[in-house]
Amino acid sequence: MKKQIILLFTLLISLTILFGCAEPEPNDSTSESNSDDTVTITISKDNGAEVISTKSVGIEQDDVLLDVLRENFEVEVTSAGFVTSIEGISQDDDQQLYWLYEVNGESPNVGAGEYNLSPDDVVVFDLHGMD
C-alpha cells in the first residue's frame, strides 16, 4: 500500500513538472496580422462589362497587390512588372487593350508590385482599351 502511495505521489509530481514547464500557446490576438483581414479582387473586361472572376482573399500586414494577385490567380508579368495576362486572358497591343487596375474606385499612382494592400480594399483589374 505504501509503495502505491509513493508511486502515485511520484506520478503526480512528474505530471506537474511536465505540464508546468510546457510553453504557453501563442495568443492569436497579439499577432501583428489579423487572419480576418480580406480584400476583394475582381478580374473583368471592357470596363466591367464582363466579369471573369471575383475572389475575397485573406491578406497580412504589408502584403503587396501583385504578390496577392499571383497567389490567387494565373498571372503573367513582364520583367518590368507590368501585368500582361490574367486567367489566360492576355492584353493585345494591336488593339491597345491593356490590364489596368483600380483600388476602391481610384487609379493608384504606383504599379501593382508597389501597392500595399489594406483590409477591405476592393481591387478591380480590367482589360480595356486606352482612350
Image (cartoon, rainbow, N blue to C red):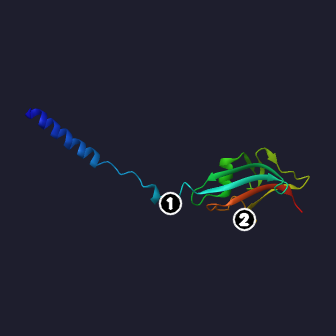
Residue 118 percent coordinates (x, y) = 62, 62
> Label 1: which residue?
32
Amino acid on which disc 1 is placed = Glu
Q: In this orientation, does residue 51 appear?
A: yes
Mark 1 or 2, nearer chain start? 1
Q: Using the image, tell me which numbered label, if any, was put on residue 122.
A: none
Q: Give the crowd class for mark 2: few <14, some 14-19, many >=20 residues within 10 Å.
A: few
Residue 18 sits in quarter: top left
Residue 9 percent coordinates (x, y) = 15, 40
Name the side, left or right, on which 113 lies relative to 16: right
Please name whichever residue, 71 or 126, is drawn nearer the observer in this view of the structure.
126
Q: Give the crowd class for mark 1: few <14, some 14-19, many >=20 residues within 10 Å.
A: few
> Label 2: which residue?
110
Q: In this orientation, does residue 78 appear?
A: no
Q: Is residue 21 above or below residue 47?
A: above
Name the side, left or right, on which 29 lies relative to 123: left
Residue 98 sits in quarter: bottom right
Residue 41 sits in quarter: bottom right
**Could you give the CA–CA distance between mark 1 and mark 2, rounded to whole angstroms?**
25 Å
Residue 38 percent coordinates (x, y) = 61, 56
Task: Give the secondary structure at mark 1.
Answer: loop
Q: Residue at x 84, y 54 (%)?
A: 49
